[in-house]
Amino acid sequence: MAGAQFEFSIDDADLQDLEDRLARPQELVPRLGEYLVRSTKDRFSTQTGPDGTPWVPLKQRYARRKKLNKDKILTLRGDLRRYIRYQPDGDAAVAVVGTNLPYGAIHQFGGTIEQPERQSTVRLRSVAGRVLFAGQRHKRAVEKSVTIPAHDVVIPARPYLGLSDQDGYNLAEIVREWLAGD
């Protein structure tokens, strides 16, 4: 009879090594977590969500008065990016990625912040017939009590947490390398 013959053998030591690895999936979590933190932080450079959609641009009014990192969205001093962390989730082989900063969620999901009416004191100065706000260093400024009416601040969603398609491929490769013992 015409045909081909194929022979293979399984080394019991290799199979035992694979079984031992599968019994300790917690060893994989640091590799996955560190990759996900790096990938999430990279989104602050590209200013895109995990699906590749660009973040909603800054409103012109805010962009004009922003003093630091004028061209960067979600970055004033870099705290949100700096505080992206991963955390193992109990005994499971799960890496949870996120931030503990209180404003992290509103940037991820968007929302409305209701500001109640409040009283404040402003310092004003006069320059060439124009009335301008004055800082503490201006000696001839006049202080005035004002009422700031209730208003809403709307923050659009700018998702920075999540998995991209490329992340899925890279995570699968990390798992394959771990299973192979690399």
Image (tube, rainbow, N blue to C red):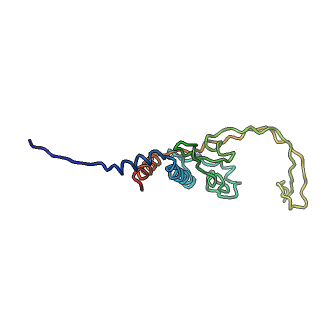
- Nearest the camera: 16 or 51? 16
Quarter of the image where the C terminus is located: bottom left
Which x, y percent locates residue 124? 86, 54
Residue 39 location in percent, x, y?
52, 52
Q: Quadrant of residue 103?
A: top right
Identify which residue is drawn at 58% across, 49% down.
Answer: 86
Task: Check the image and name the residue furthest to the left.
Answer: 1
Residue 146 picture quarter: top right
Is residue 44 rendered to the left or right of residue 152?
A: left
Q: Is residue 84 left or right of residue 117?
A: left
Out of 19 and 80, give the one closest to the viewer: 19
Left or right: residue 144 versus residue 82 is right
Q: Quadrant of the N terminus?
A: top left
- Please report the residue visible at 72 percent of the width from the left and 39 percent of the height from the top: 113
Q: Nearer the viewer, residue 22 or 96?
A: 22
Residue visible at 63% across and 40% down in the picture:
110
Q: How many marks?
A: 0
Residue 158 percent coordinates (x, y): 59, 45
31 and 64: which is toward the camera: 31
Q: In which quadrant of the rendered view does residue 133 lie?
A: bottom right
Place of residue 78 in the rendered image (x, y in percent of width and height, measured from the top left):
65, 56
